[in-house]
Image (cartoon, rainbow, N blue to C red):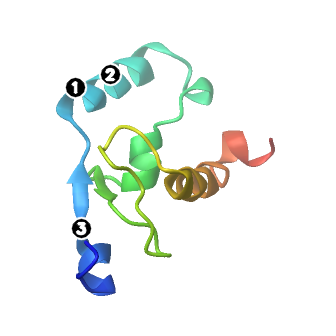
Amino acid sequence: FQDTSYEYRMSLRWTVRQEEREINRILKKNLDRKVIVDIEKLVCGQNYSCPVFTPENRLVSPDASHLTPSGAKFVGAILFKYPPLKYL
C-alpha cells in the first residue's frame, strides 16, 4: 500500500464474515442487550463493511481478526462512545 493514495486507502474495506454475524445474532437473541456490544457493527456500520485504514492512514488490522496498535486506538475510541462503555 506504500505507493497508493490516501483516498484509495480510505476506500478499502473488508466485510465481517457471516459466521461472526451469526454469532452476534445469537448472542443478541439470547442475552440482555445491556451486556452485548456488537463491535463489528459499531466499527463497520450496518452493512459490516470495515475500514482497512484509520483516518490517520494507519493499518487497522493485518488479517481482519487482530488489531494493530493503531487499530486498537481507533476501535477503542469508537467503542468508548457507545453508551454502556461511555462511562467506564
Counting from the top left corner in percent of width and height, residue 6 is at 33, 84
- Give the residue number, with chain letter if any, for mark 1: 19
Residue 87 sits in which quadrant?
A: top right
- Three-letter amino acid code of the residue under disc 3: Leu
Q: CA distance from mark 3 to mark 1?
A: 22 Å
- Give the residue number, with chain letter if any, for mark 2: 23
Q: Secondary structure at mark 1?
A: helix
- Give the residue number, with chain letter if any, for mark 3: 12
Question: Would residue 11 be found to the left or right of residue 25 on screen?
Answer: left
Counting from the top left corner in percent of width and height, residue 20 is at 29, 29
Counting from the top left corner in percent of width and height, residue 67 is at 46, 45
Return the disc, 2 or 3, that comes first in the chain's sequence. Answer: 3
Residue that protrudes farthest toward the left in the picture: 18
Return the disc, 3 or 1, that comes first in the chain's sequence. Answer: 3
Front disc: 2 or 3: 3
The answer to whether marks 2 and 3 mark residues whose Cβ atoms lie closer than 8 Å is: no
Question: Would residue 53 be found to the left or right of residue 71 on screen?
Answer: left
Q: Is residue 55 depicted above or below 87 in this figure?
A: below
Q: Secondary structure at mark 3?
A: loop
Front disc: 3 or 1: 3
The answer to whether marks 2 and 1 mark residues whose Cβ atoms lie closer than 8 Å is: yes
- Of residues 85 and 74, which is closer to you in this image? 74
- Residue at image x 19%, y 32%? 18
- Three-letter amino acid code of the residue under disc 1: Glu
- Residue at image x 34%, y 61%? 51
